[in-house]
Structure formats: structure tokens, C-alpha cells
Amino acid sequence: MHVIDSHTGGEPTRVILDGGPDLGAGPLAERARRLATDHRTFCRAVVGEPRGQVAMVCALLIEPVDPDCVTGVIYFDAGAVLGMCGHGTIGLAATLVHMGRIGPGRHRIETPVGVVGIDIHDANTVTVTNVESRRLRAGVSVEVPGLGTITGDIAFGGNGFFLVDPSPIPVNAANIRALADATIAVRAALAAEGIGCGDCPVDHVIFYGPPETPEGHSRNFVLCPDDAYDRSPCGTGSSARLACLASDGKLAEGEEILQESVIGSTYRLSWRKGPTGGVIPSITGQAFVMAESRLLFPPEDPFRAGIAP
């Protein structure tokens, strides 16, 4: 299996160029459902240990339905098949540039939740124009053991999010373990009360705190479906954040902010009005290709299918 690995703000992406399962034809959303239901062993073998690493997201390249798109892609991590992935799209774009498949300028990529745009500024710097994002519910409170009442917003940015501002725990690298435990508990409490995000689950939780740089807007901690934290500021989470800030009148259309991650990597964010009342997010970040390799799956390997959690 031919793969290329990159990282976006410290968050790894593995682009799968060949060797993936046959998902048939039809809309990408349907092919993503087939991947999620019929090929979990494949996903675990590629993204999980010993071949993968904690926090890795895989990008499976497939034929797009839209002929104007340079590729179709389905993203997945160790916990779920994803609707979209912002850092993964930046990583995929840098990988396609590395391969010589695209160059500077604007291109389109098809995902299970719709077509997204990418603007290639240089070999590493990419702006993603995400699908329309929106806040679905404001001021949702949930009782969380050990934390008490936690209140946040439910929003869609390509995936389902619960956004908490301010965080009950200081958002800094020294508190990563405590932040992970707290966000896992919040997500479990939301699931126990049946609180979702329309047609998709709330499988991501974000805590916000003050920035650590003068130019930063805020610093976030993002819990992903596989219980790992996002090393980048999270592209789909930033999209959900933009929808909330816009709804509250806290960020004007076209105004740009700098979002910090818990480890200090950054995205530049802005938004414009969407056609159905949401926002069209713009996320600019950098990705760097780290490795190109072929994964082997010998039948005698006892961990050929990865290490089960």
C-alpha cells in the first residue's frame, strides 16, 4: 500500500494512494458509509499501531463524482470515518503538490459532506474553503461527573462539535491529560443525554482558553473521535467556531483571527455568508510532507490488522 505522511501544525495525515478496499460507485457519503460498516479492520490496520500513530488521520483517495474535482477523499481516524477533516485537507493538498499532481492556484476536492476548495499559496501553505457551517444550538448545559454543569454550543463544521468557552481547565500543554479526561467525560455525558448534531454525532469536544501570543484570538484543546487530541487547531472545529462567533456578532464577515492549538500551532480563520444562512469558513495553515513509504501486511504477522483497543 503506497502512502505519503505529512503533518499539519503537528497533526499527522496519511494519504493512501493505492491498496484500499473497493467501495463501489455512487455518492461519497454512501462510499464512506461502506468504509465505516464493512472495512473497519482495514481502517485499524492502516491508522492504528503498529503502522500508524496516535492522532493520525488517514485520507483514502477515491474517484470523485464531480469531474471538476482533482480527487475524492474519505477521511478516517482510529475511532470513526469522518465527514470532513480540515488539517487532513491541508495535508492532502501539500501531498498532491509534492507529487506534482497540482500546483499553485485554486482547486476542488470532493468529500462525503460536499466539495471543498483549496488555494495553494506555496508548497506548504494552503487555504481551505470548507462546506457551509452553522451553529445548531446555543447554551446547551450538561451535567458531567467531576466537573459539574458544563455549558457550550452545538455546531457543525463538517463534523459535529460541542464547543465550551471558557474551558473549566486552563488550556495549555501542561494540562493535556486533564483536558483529555475532561472532554471525554463531557462527550460521554452528551451521548448519555442523547444530545447530537442533527444527522451526525457530537464526536468532537473543544475547550477554549485565552491565547498565549499577542496576536492570538484564543487557544483550544480539541478531542477527536479516537480520544486523541488534535495537535493542530482543528479545521472543522475552527469552522464550527466561526459559525458560533458569527452568530454571536463577535466576528465580522471577512475579519481574520489567529487560532492557536494547545501546542501552539496556528490557523488563520475568516468567514463569509453562506447560501442557506450559515457561514463559509476559510482556514489557512501549513503542512509538511514527512515520509513516503509502502505498508506491508504479511499474512503471518499476528498484528497484520493492527492492535485492537
Image: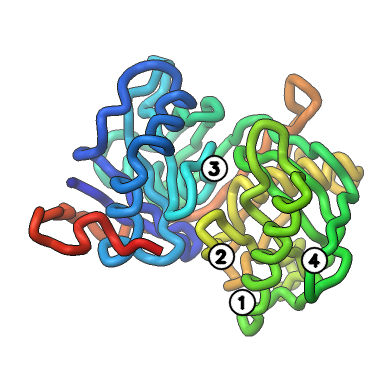
Q: Is residue 250 above or below residue 144?
A: above
- How far is mark 3 from mark 1, CA to CA? 28 Å
Say which element carries label 3: strand
- How far is mark 4 from mark 1, CA to CA? 18 Å
Disc 3 residue crowd, few under 14, some 14–19, many 20+, Cα 10 Å: many
Q: Amino acid at mark 4?
A: Val
Q: Of callouts 1 and 2, which one flags the residue occurring earlier in the amino acid sequence? A: 1
- How far is mark 4 from mark 2, CA to CA? 19 Å
Q: Is residue 24 above or below residue 37?
A: above
- How far is mark 2 from mark 3, CA to CA? 22 Å
Disc 4 residue crowd, few under 14, some 14–19, many 20+, Cα 10 Å: some
Q: Amino acid at mark 3?
A: Thr
Left or right: 41, with 223 as reference point: left
Q: Which residue is labeled 3 in the image?
A: 127
Q: Amino acid at mark 1?
A: Ile
Q: Which residue is labeled 4 in the image?
A: 144
Residue at 61% across, 45% down: 236
Say which element carries label 1: helix
Provide residue 224's location: percent of width, then percent of height.
Answer: 57, 57
Provide residue 201's location: percent of width, then percent of height.
Answer: 64, 42
Residue 229: give its label: 2
Q: Which residue is labeled 1 in the image?
A: 176
Question: Of the residues tagged 4 and 1, which is closer to the observer?
Answer: 4
